[in-house]
Amino acid sequence: MNNHITSDGVTTRRNLLRAGALASGAAAAASLVPAGAASAATGNRGAARSPGQVPGTCSAVDISHATPAVAERLVRYFRRKSAQDLDGTMALFARRPCMYIDATLGWDLGSWAEIHAFFAQYMPGWPAGSASYPVRILGDMRSAVVFFTDTAGLFGPSELRLAGAVDLENGLIARQVDYWDGRHFGVEDLAGLQVPADRFPTDFGESTVRGSRSAVMQHVVRDLAGALRKGDGAAAARLFAPDAVFEDAPAHIRIEGPRSIGGYLTAASGLLPYVGKGTGVRHVLGNELGGGYEYTSADGPVPRGLVGLELDRWRKISRFTAMWDGALVDDAVLLSLAGKAVER
């Protein structure tokens, strides 16, 4: 091969070598991208493609830690729900088992017929342009965590930002439990909708579904929940990726990096509802890409909540998002949680 550049731009040996080096570098860089994100970023057959969004909404759906099948199925569910398509919405629910629980209001719909009646009552009154739309989906067609928004007017005068635990059987929703912060909705508005504490459901139907079948997610949740139960922030920190993000929605806290995350979990261990000896795992969801777990707490004022987890290809936690009802604690607790995030 000649080692010169011709006037018509024929590639020389030097240029070929340079191109080879660039290709090798690109391949090496691609190997550092989490498996789910890598497949979504490529144009190859089988890569994850965006399933679209609910019409009239402008936010993209983050499906980087979900399988394409569950992303498509859940977006379809929210599109039909937003379109007030009662029959289309209910066609995506399993007949048995079938339950829908609001973990903040205490609403417990234990059958397909009850869920149908619920939507039949509310959908006709939804204002024009309203929507229920997904923001982030984690998991697979067996179980998933979905973060979504209900615009104002669907269930009261305020918008809702929720995290749903979703179990599917044969591609249909068999169980959905929604967690959200009552303070974001408005404490006064919440009081008019909430079931009295003594009538709150104690069984969230987790025994009727299988949940996560992923050994990876089960292992991560076991180790994380175990460390948090002991209040051991340092042990929990070792489970996080180098650039991990920790979010607590009701506390309005965002922390980056394992060292800072571990320090916060230790400092705030007496205040966070998912940390301490009274905490337990109710139900695990998702796969090796993402998901999370529903937790219970026997010792504090917040008895339940949900943690969303995103995992990287090394099975480290790259994003942790906690959702619970902030209306169950007073202002002083939230202020103290914010104070614990100050680093010195």
Image (cartoon, helix red, strand yellow):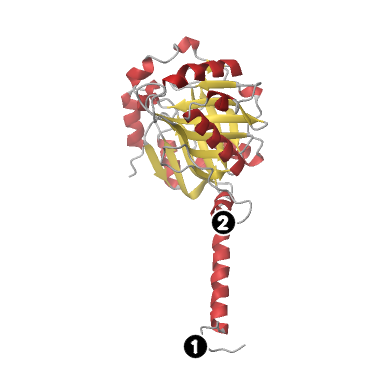
Q: Residue at x 66, y 36 (%)?
A: 213
Count all numbered tags in the image, as a single digit: 2
Q: Position of residue 318 (x, y in %)?
A: 50, 46
Q: Quadrant of the N terminus?
A: bottom right
**Residue 193 in picture, x, y percent from top left:** 41, 15
Which element is circle 1 on? loop
The amino acid beneath tag 2 is: Thr
Residue 72 percent location from the top left of the image = 57, 39
Q: Residues within 10 Å of mark 2 (few under 14, many from 20)?
A: few
Residue 173 occupies quadrant: top right
Res. 275 visible in picture: no
Please name which of the two marks, 2 or 1, marks the residue nearer to the observer: 1
Q: Between 272 and 270, which is closer to the camera in this rendering?
A: 272
Q: Residue beneath label 2, please?
A: 42
Identify the amino acid type marked 1.
Ser
Q: On the image, numbered disc 1 is attached to which residue? A: 7
Circle 2: element type: loop
Q: Nearer the viewer, residue 336 or 198?
A: 198
Q: Residue at x 65, y 33 (%)?
A: 171
Please rate how many residues cluster around mark 1, counting C-alpha atoms within 10 Å: few if below 14, some from 14 to 19, many from 20: few
Q: CA distance from mark 2 to mark 1?
A: 35 Å
Q: Residue at x 51, y 85 (%)?
A: 8
Marking on residue 221: none
Pick the quarter of the image with the C terminus.
top left
